[in-house]
Amino acid sequence: MIAYYVELAEKYPGKIFSIEDGLAENDWEGWQKLTQEMKKYDIRTIGDDLFVTQSGRLENGIKIQAATDILIKVNQNGTMSGTLEVIKRAKQAGMGWIVSHRSGETLDTSIADLAYATKALGLKAGDPQPDYDFGEGGPYQNQPLVRRFKYLRMVEIEKRES
């Protein structure tokens, strides 16, 4: 798998920003090698399942330099204070973080505030679901724009801050 990522990095120089969950969640040795290789191409390695927003797994990853960044999901940690501790530790170790939505979507936009307040590298919320005719009989009828709410919250924050 690492050889394949190297092949892609060489085929598309400067086009790949990051690889998220590039290897199995318990392949610590592989992650270490992946990160070493991707650094040569200035490609970030982001651990989601590798770290699951848990301090113990993050500490192991920091010790062996398994990834450059961590994906942050409040629901994986279980508490906001615990999540903030994980972010703090990642920052101390020189890692970046991306705040992400949970698998089961909600209308809660607090992850946008968390991403902004902690100066995250970004917010992962899926595609923003553009405006379509959501009227009766349309292809998107009755599909809530749960992801878009998070983007709109980021826009609102940005407007207030500028």
Image (cartoon, grey):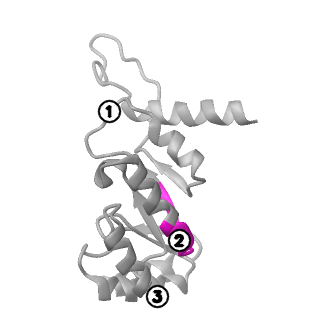
Marks 1, 3: nearer the viewer: 1
Question: Would you say residue 17 is visible in this rendering?
Answer: no
Residue type for callout 1 = Thr
Q: Position of residue 40 (x, y in %)?
A: 55, 87
- Under circle 1, the secondary element is loop
Q: Earlier in the sequence, mark 2 or mark 1?
A: 2
The residue wearing badge 1 is 106
Magenta segment: 89-98
Residue type for callout 2 = Met
Q: Earlier in the sequence, mark 3 or mark 2?
A: 3
Q: What's the residue at 31%, 70% (across, down)?
A: 50
Note whether 54 is above or below 139 in the view shown: below
- Under circle 3, the secondary element is helix
Q: Classify residue 71 by image quadrant.
A: bottom left
Q: What's the residue at 69%, 30% (across, down)?
A: 160
Q: Badge 1: how crowded within 10 Å, few (<14), some, or many (20+)?
A: some
Does residue 115 appear left or right of residue 45 in this picture? Answer: right
Residue 95 shows which numbered tag?
Answer: 2
Q: Position of residue 7 (x, y in %)?
A: 42, 83
